[in-house]
Image (cartoon, grey):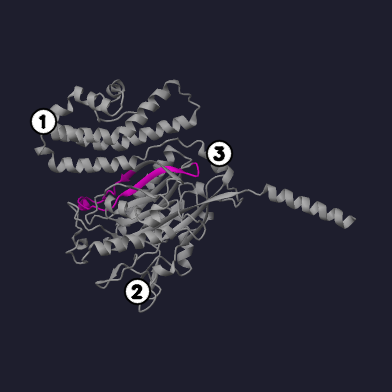
Amino acid sequence: MKKHFLLIILLAFAAINVSAQKKYAVYGVGFYNQENLFDTQHDEGKNDYDFLPDGSYKWNELKYNHKLHNMARALADMGTDMLPNGCAIIGLSEVENANALTDLCAQPELAARGYKFAHIEGPDRRGVDCALLYNPSLFTIKDVKLVPYIPELEKDSTFKTRGFLTVRGYLAGEPVAVIVCHWPSRFSGSFYRECAGRQVKVVKDALLEENPNIKVMVMGDMNDDPQNKSMSVELSAKGKMKDVREGDMFNPWWAVLESGTGTLSYQGSWNLFDQIVMTPNMLDLKGTKDYSKLTYLKCQIQRFDYLLQSEGKYKGTPKRTTAGGEWLDGFSDHLPVAVYLVKEADRVTEDMKLVPKDLYDISDVERKLDNILKKARAESETWTDDEWRDQCKNIMKTLQPVLLKMENLSKRMENIDSNDHAMMEEVSTMTAQLDNVSKYMVEFSELAGQSEIGSVVWEDDDFWTSVAKDLGIDPEFFKAEEAQPFDEVSEP
């Protein structure tokens, strides 16, 4: 009888223990250098001639489509060893433009999960940019900015390279910022990457100063290993959690490289240029396994067999798209990397309530405005009155979702409660989004001011009122908020 009684107690204890077990949500965050993901068209002002059908790589539609398929396959597989639906966020480097990104996201492997992208055209002479792929069901974008790389020596005043793509948003209901980088090449010398490290640290520190709770990840092809000065000193990314102090970052890849492996191979040795580092507020520094907030779990090189050479002199190294003048129909000279973050599922549900609802993806608007502006730069001097009016209508049509959102928010703010944190965050987000698009509008207004015809159209209040009515925007709201259409936008 006593044995049965003890067994009942043990079973009851086990039942209580099981019921008390917490459920966790895991998120994958990755980075992958795309190694020359160019389309087959020339971009004005860019040195992309090698990647044209008559260029040195004979870059035709066949090769481009194979490249898209290959990269989409690898990107879709990233993180699937733990997560069936792969990574929530993936930073990219060496992507030519929004057209290539659109084609990439249209590939079946990525389209099936609804991946979208954030991207701003940069100044790199060769035309390669950084971008961010994201699954909108897991990551919500707040704003996107390209912080320029600033040459620190007077002799380098004309030096142009990739900036730091800074994307703010919400992951697991928490504010997160991702800074996607592709630092200057080894050919440029260590000093220029050290400059990049200093400048990215300034960006990271500014994000934390504005919101101490934001979790910041710096990722990219740094063209340096974890222990190099640009990473370990200038960015202050430490290799051991116990060494991480306020103002530092944690770099889990230090130990990975010391184990003898990396993400790219050169002359028989491995380097680990592709890294994702994070701020201390993402770490379990005390070892308590408190996952009530988004917390770093582990890192991993995504070493899929098909990404590696299977034979020959370079067996076991990344299978490139092209090598030695021969098209290999491969992937990249780098391997992808990923980190995994964990959080209590119940806390995700609660924190998601604080994320602003119905955020409009401003990156779509920015891409369309950028295309309008490119056309205006090239052609506006010869535009007729009708052409100016058509382009102004095109701008308003592009901005319609943002303006309608702004109009709705303005009405709701009439009775705003300062303790309504969700509403205050929505206001902050809307302000940031308007700030993002204002730079396009300022330049367009300047182009209009340089044209006699454009100036007349731009100052025609009746025209703008008519356009607003056609698009369902309250003309009175439009006049109040945009007395001079698309000049500097103030906070709602």
User: What residue lies at 34% left-to-right and 53% top-to-bottom?
Assistant: 106
Q: Residue 350 carries which label?
A: 3
Distance, label 2 to label 1, CA atoms, is 61 Å
The reply to whether callout 1 and callout 3 are in contact (CB within 8 Å) is no
Q: Which of marks 2 and 3 is in front?
A: 3
Q: Which mark is residue 267?
A: 2
State which region is magenta. Answer: 145-173
User: What residue lies at 33% left-to-right and 43% top-to-bottom?
Assistant: 145
Classify 10 Å Cα crowding around label 2: few (below 14), some (14-19), many (20 and above).
few
Res 169 quadrant in image: top left
Residue 352 position within the rendered picture, expressed as x and y whole percent measured from the top left: 51, 39
Q: Mark 1 points at which residue?
A: 453
Quadrant of the rendering where the N terminus is positioned: bottom right
Q: Can residue 205 be seen in this view?
A: yes
Distance, label 1 to label 3, CA atoms, is 55 Å
Quadrant of the rendering where the C terminus is positioned: top left
Amino acid, disc 2: Gln
Amino acid, disc 1: Ile
Looking at marks 2 and 3 on the same chain, the residue that comes earlier in the sequence is marked by 2
